[in-house]
Amino acid sequence: MKFAICQELFEGWDWARQCQFIHETGYTGVELAPFAFAGHPREISSDRRVSLRNTAEQSSLEIIGLHWLLAKTEGLHLTSVDPNVRKATADYLIQLGDLCGDLGGEVMVFGSPFQRNLDDEVTFEQGLEFAAEVFRDSLPRIAERGVTVCMEPLTTAETNFITSCADAKQLIERVDHPHFALHQDVKAMLTESTSIPDLIREYASLTRHFHVNDSNLLGPGMGETDYAPILSALLETGYDGWVSVEVFDYKPGCELIARESLRYLETTLAKVNE
């Protein structure tokens, strides 16, 4: 099982320091939030992309991909009624796909709750079609870069569009592209009526990426969720993607969160494998 961590946790740290610490802690992958490096992908030059990748590789880290794809952007929206906005969103995703490919990443997690919310006049069915249009327009180029876009169900407290694995499956089937898949997130799955291990089993054929955290917005092992059945289900289903730590409450400090999350995951995995 491969463990990674989302790097926006390390606020104020330069990239080399992030990579060194993440490697020394024991992670082998790092997941990037584009806004942590620039306001727009075009602002990250070719030389800077090479440097970012080389710095990670020098720390024996793999850049696994991107998430928070539309965070801190303006004029972009997945389910907008305006076709020009949808076109701009598809174009932006293509630019992110090129960035991801240049960095050596293979996954882009589409979360971005505010940039996918349905307006009052947009039905769920219309939202599915608008979103499918954006992904159909952007995926051919993204796939050329060897990158898969993974749709992330979020909680109803965060968004009103794609709030369950079943919702995401509908969109994935509508887009019908081999580089469009499911992302599962523990915090979000905790709000579903089906247990997390059962959700992992049910959607195993669609899942390409996995985030670990807890309902308290901290890392695995820092809340009440028992990860033994979760890791067991991932092993049982043959999941071979990354298990990436993503937290939203930074108050305990990035170093403690990173260390405790990985320690708990590795300890729990060892018990599961006994």
Image (cartoon, rainbow, N blue to C red):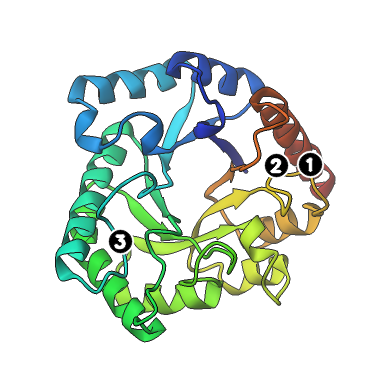
Badge nearest the viewer, 3 or 2: 3
Q: Please say if 250 is above or below 137.
A: above
Q: Is residue 251 visible?
A: yes
- Distance from label 3 to label 2 (Cα)? 29 Å
Answer left or right for 101 relative to 107. left
Q: Amino acid at mark 3?
A: His
Q: Amino acid at mark 1?
A: Met
Crowding at dot 1, Cα within 10 Å, few <14 / some 14-19 / many 20+, comes out as some
Which residue is at 21% across, 58% downward?
Answer: 90
Q: Secondary structure at mark 3?
A: loop
Q: Secondary structure at mark 2?
A: loop
Q: Contact (CB < 8 A) between labels 2 and 1? A: yes
Give the x, y percent position of residue 45: 20, 25
Q: Please say if 37 is above or below 91.
A: above
- Distance from label 2 to label 1 (Cα)? 5 Å
* In the foreground, 234 or 174: 174
Q: Which residue bears the numbered disc 3?
A: 77
Which residue is at 43% across, 47% downward?
Answer: 68
- Kindly indicate the quadrant of the structure image that contains residue 254: top right
* In the foreground, 232 or 191: 191
Which residue is at 54% across, 15% downward?
Answer: 20
Q: Is residue 176 visible?
A: no
Q: Which residue bears the numbered disc 1?
A: 222
Q: Secondary structure at mark 1?
A: loop
Q: Which residue bears the numbered disc 2?
A: 219
Answer left or right for 47 relative to 257. left
